[in-house]
Amino acid sequence: MKTLKLTVSIGIPAYNEEKNIKRLLLAILKQKRLNWILNEIIIYSDASNDNTVKEVKSLNNSLIKIISAKERKGKIYAMRTIQKKFSSEILVFLDADIRLGDNLVLSYLVQEFTNNPKVMVVGAHSKPEKSQGFIQKAIYSKFEIFESYRIKIKDGHNIFNCTGACFCLRKQFANELIYPEILINEDDFSYLTCIYKGYKFRYAKRAFVYYKLPNNLIDYVKLTFRSNHKIVGPIFKKYFGRFAYEQTSIPLNLYFKSLVKVLRTSPAEILFISILSMIISPFIPKNKETIGLSQYTISSTK
């Protein structure tokens, strides 16, 4: 019996990604297409002032489409533009600074859609690259807590495994999903909308993608400001009410078990990052405009 193959569009919002964009595109083109057909790769360059566009064009591949914006409008605008232009059954959003774990990542993601027609959103297994130096190791220790509990809630099929580094939308849902102009956590918003509408989300645990952690305190603080509940909470409450709180709540016993586990191996790092978080918490702004336009990952501009 012939395996059903779904058509796939890749959407990549990019800002100043000359160092990684070509590497990522080559990795996508080398993916094994076991259960999918690659229709197009759409890159939206958000007024990049480096060689991002030049690097993309150097591949001279008919599957690659570049949108070179003259005015910077932010990641959400880029994603909304890609949503309007893609032409496949599945839309895969990738951050421009990630690394694909192997050549089966996209096949693992697509498989979740073929398994169940009610699945509208699929998340990859995103992980940080190996940490270097004390600052990155301290930030990584915080991720280890997160990693420990997120795979146990609902067998991994939860909001914490829908991450901006890589997630996918079925066309039916992509046509329904409307990102607000003022939005930071597009991944969480996608998940919440999916579940709120009665659809299903799946976490593709074998689809590893890797991203870089901030390597200095300034970048970490910026990242914290962008994703703090003081900012994203009111937005989610406006659209989903208490449902958002229920979906993002972590069982205390599970959190503390994860914390104790990491404390045994990284006590100094956990202590440092906890104290830092307490220090910066009072200074976190309560609206997106205070942070500025950029919603791209910190390493995107490195």
Image (cartoon, rainbow, N blue to C red):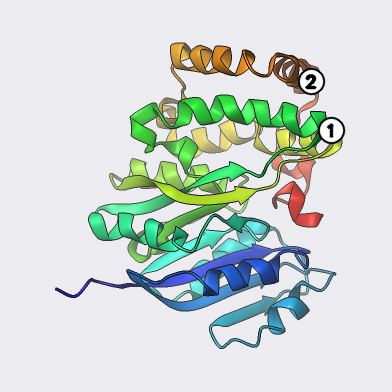
Q: Is residue 47 above or below residue 243?
A: below
The image quarter containing residue 155 is: top left
Q: Is residue 75 above or below residue 281?
A: below
Which residue extends farthest left?
Answer: 1
**Residue 97 is at least partly visible in this image:** yes
Which residue occupies the foreground of this view, 46 or 206?
206
| Residue under the image location 59 percent in, 81 percent down | 65
- Per the image, label 2 sits on a secondary structure element best described as helix
Q: Residues within 10 Å of mark 2 (few under 14, many from 20)?
A: some
Which residue occupies the foreground of this view, 134 or 217?
134
Quadrant position of the N terminus in the picture: bottom left
Q: Compute the Cα span from label 1 to label 2.
A: 9 Å
**Residue at mark 2:** 276
| Residue under the image location 50 percent in, 71 percent down | 84
| Residue under the image location 60 percent in, 49 percent down | 210
Q: Position of residue 279 (x, y in %)?
A: 81, 18
Q: Position of residue 243 (x, y in %)?
A: 40, 30
The image quarter containing residue 43 is: bottom right
**Residue at mark 1:** 217
N-term-proximal mark, 1 vs 2: 1
Q: Position of residue 251 (x, y in %)?
A: 43, 17
| Residue under the image location 40 percent in, 64 percent down | 175
* Type of amino acid under label 2: Leu
**Residue 229 is at least partly visible in this image:** no
